[in-house]
Image (spheres, rainbow, N blue to C red):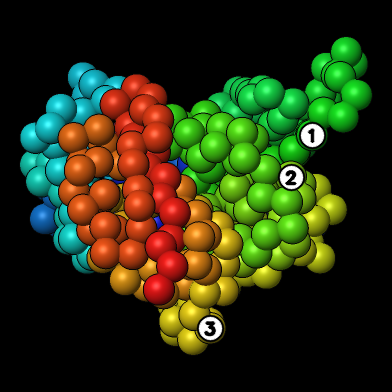
């Protein structure tokens, strides 16, 4: 569940959408220069074309591509959790059915705003904010509050765990970046609670759709022998590798970006597969996840709205004995055990 370039932002996501100091380029690059955030509204049908025009304009002006391009519902009264009619799961390449959207672009190099207006016909309310690196640091720290689950403490890298930390507490630091996964969203927390309750000691684990790498890293810190972290988004894999180094578990985490590499893995490779993605994608992945799960191996699936649970369970019934294991704020966690044979 990672933020995608020029893709729809999930209405329920509250992860930070801008890099802190030191990210968004090579280390030390632009160190003292500000970030710019460009915001405009447009018809949803025009959003992808306008994003492409913005990238072209920045490139022609000698600048870099935006570090982040996000499309969201332009309604200011959108509820935190959508009702059943909201289009949470557009098909690949499709835009959701929001009639009016807001585009947010984060970039480094200044560009003339009046010239940009000419390049972006159909963009209304075009405006720009200048943001210093320290503003992003503060924003990221504010967005990622520490969470505690049993003996697990997860927080941003610049915030020390409480001095009263119990002996044996597992401490996980996260570097806020472009990838989804601070642990605050109910779907991520459901998976974390499952890991804490059932540590994957000496297991081979696959984190399918790793985002920031939080689940892969926690699995490694809780005793997993080897963890494969898969995501098609470069930002996600960069964040996963950085967070793995930060928590000194890089030697047990392998990142994969090519779906064909996942398909080429031997059958029954994993005793635990974690997948915190969308229900429709989970349904499509059922045969592949079944093939990769070892006999009596387990799956933990999230990113599923409560009324989608039966659909996902049904998709896995050929290979797994699965059940609705937990719910939180309208989201579900499904657990399953691979049958022998």
Which of pointers 1 and 2 lies earlier in the amino acid sequence? Answer: 1
Q: Badge 3 is on which residue?
A: 266
Q: Nearer the viewer, residue 230 or 226?
A: 226
Q: Is residue 80 above or below residue 223?
A: above
Label 2 and label 3: CA atoms lie apart by: 25 Å
Whether residue 228 is visible to the viewer of this picture, yes or no, is yes
Q: Residue at x 52, y 74 (%)?
A: 268
Q: CA distance from mark 3 to mark 1?
A: 32 Å
Residue 288 in the image: above or below residue 114? below
Residue furthest out toward the top? 164
Toward the front, the furthest residue is 341
Q: Which residue is mark 1?
A: 170
Left or right: where does residue 285 sit relative to residue 291? Answer: left
- Residue 64: x %, y % from top left: 53, 65
Label disc, if present, on residue 222 of the rendered structure:
2
Count residues near mark 2 (Cα–Cα under 10 Å), then give few for <14, some for 14-19, many for 20+: some
Closest to the observer, 208 or 41? 208
**Image location (x, y in percent) of residue 163:** 89, 16
**From the viewer's perspective, is the residue at label 1 or at label 2 nearer?**
2
The quadrant the C terminus occupies is bottom left
Callout 3 environment at 10 Å: few (<14), some (14 to 19), or many (20+)? few
The residue drawn where x is 21% and y is 53% is 314
Vertically, is 287 above or below 325?
below
What is the crowding at mark 1: few (fewer than 14 residues within 10 Å), some, or many (at least 20)? Answer: some
Residue 190 vs residue 86, the one in the foreground: 190
């Amino acid at each position: 569940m990672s933020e995608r370039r020029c893709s729809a932002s999930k209405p329920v996501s509250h992860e930070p959408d801008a890099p802190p100091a030191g990210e968004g380029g090579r280390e030390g690059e632009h160190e003292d220069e500000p970030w710019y955030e460009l915001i405009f509204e447009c018809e949803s049908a025009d959003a992808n074309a306008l994003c492409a025009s913005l990238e072209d304009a920045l490139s022609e002006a000698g600048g870099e591509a935006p570090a982040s391009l996000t499309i969201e519902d332009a309604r200011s009264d959108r509820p935190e959790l959508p009702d059943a009619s909201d289009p949470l799961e557009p098909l690949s390449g499709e835009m959701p059915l929001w009639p009016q959207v807001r585009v947010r672009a984060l970039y480094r190099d200044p560009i003339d705003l009046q010239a940009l207006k000419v390049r972006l016909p159909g963009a209304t309310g075009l405006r720009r904010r200048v943001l210093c690196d320290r503003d992003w640091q503060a924003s990221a720290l504010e967005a990622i509050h520490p969470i505690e689950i049993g003996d697990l403490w997860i927080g941003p890298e610049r915030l020390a765990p409480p001095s009263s930390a119990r002996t044996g507490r597992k401490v996980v630091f996260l570097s806020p970046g472009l990838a989804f996964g601070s642990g605050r969203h109910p779907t991520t927390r459901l998976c974390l609670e499952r890991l804490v309750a059932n540590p994957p000691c000496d297991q081979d684990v696959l984190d399918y759709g790793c985002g920031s790498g939080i689940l892969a890293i926690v699995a490694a810190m809780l005793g997993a022998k080897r963890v494969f972290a898969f995501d098609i988004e470069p930002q996600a894999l960069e964040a996963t590798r950085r967070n793995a180094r930060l928590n000194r578990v890089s030697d047990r985490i392998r990142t994969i970006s090519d779906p064909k590499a996942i398909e080429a893995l031997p059958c029954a490779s994993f005793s635990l597969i974690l997948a915190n993605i969308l229900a429709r994608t989970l349904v499509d992945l059922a045969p592949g996840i079944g093939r990769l799960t070892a006999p009596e191996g387990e799956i933990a699936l999230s990113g599923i709205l409560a009324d989608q649970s039966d659909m996902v369970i049904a998709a896995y019934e050929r290979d797994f004995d699965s059940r609705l294991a937990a719910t939180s704020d309208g989201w579900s966690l499904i657990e399953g055990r691979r049958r022998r044979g």
